[in-house]
Image (spheres, rainbow, N blue to C red):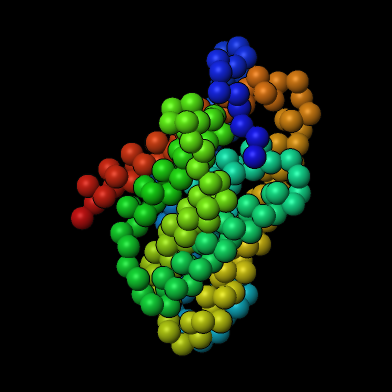
Amino acid sequence: MARLPTGNGAFVPYAGVLRALLIPFGLLVSGGVALAHGVAEGDKGYIQEISGVHLVSFVYLGAKHMVTGYDHLLFLAGVIFFLYRVKDIGLYVSLFALGHSTTMLLGVYYEIGINAYLIDAIIGLSVVYKALDNLGAFQRWFGVQPNTKAATLIFGLFHGFGLATKIQDYDVARDGLVPNLLAFNVGVELGQLLALGAILIVMGFWRRSGGFFRHAYAANVAMMAAGFTLVGMQLTGFLVVK
């Protein structure tokens, strides 16, 4: 996987830094001021009133959650930032999907309870990790390079537990639980594909411009800052909300 040079790199104009900052922080702000991208009250009320198999509803909810999940989108953007070949993008996205699908299904089915703020803080750290990896920080600081495929899968597992905590907020009926969970997972994957397609289109235009590598450093620093912001928000929520 390509990374930025571990040296000083090229000069990044101030205007370029500002443009790069808008991408991750725009995603963060668009998620709202809530400490975690939780469950909409209307959706929660609907799910609590129904039982049995409702495949279309859960596909919709899964897609909606992924498309509005700014922390998941930031991590995905970091993962594909320097990926150019379709097969590489497919491999990393598949590893991420395998991870979050596994823990999401098992977490809900076996009612594994993890504090939503703590798991979302770990998800925020995954964004920080990916930005640092793109910057070549691990090679520069420690002289080692983490296995990026293993890291994507492992962080996918944590993202899945984040999804599981949100689904458990719905108080889903046990009647029809497995088909509904599978439908939710299908929706998550559809939402991920839609979001990934949009990110790739934007990245494609940006990569063809002359400023991609000049601004890539600033974009990843901004992504790292957004990740630390997510971590701070979630830890604050953990300490404040009882």
- For the point 29% across and 45% down, the residue is 235
| Vertical comparison of 170 with 129: above or below | below
Task: State the image coordinates of residue 161 (x, y, percent, origin top left).
Answer: 42, 62
Residue displayed at 79% across by 29% down: 208
**Which residue is at a point 57% across and 69% down the rendered structure image?**
185
Residue drawn at point x = 50 percent, y = 50 percent: 151
Side of 138 where 14 appears, left or right: right
Q: Residue furthest right?
A: 208
Instruction: Give the residue at the far front of this rendering.
Output: 143
Viewer-closest of 43 and 53: 53
Vertically, is 122 above or below 65? above
Residue 10 versus residue 240 in the image, above or below: above
Residue 131 visible, this angle: no
| Whole-percent x, y for residue 69 in the image | 52, 51
Residue 208 vs residue 172, the one in the foreground? 208
**Position of residue 3 in the picture relative to residue 225 (left or right):** right
Q: Quadrant of the N terminus?
A: top right
Instruction: Answer left or right for 121 relative to 70.
Output: left
Front residue of this view, candidates 92 and 30: 92
Query: Which quadrant of the figure contains the C terminus?
Result: bottom left
Looking at the image, residue 225 lies above or below residue 156? above
Return the x and y of residue 81 as percentages of the image width and height.
64, 38
The percent position of residue 183, horizontal first and vertical second, equals 59, 74
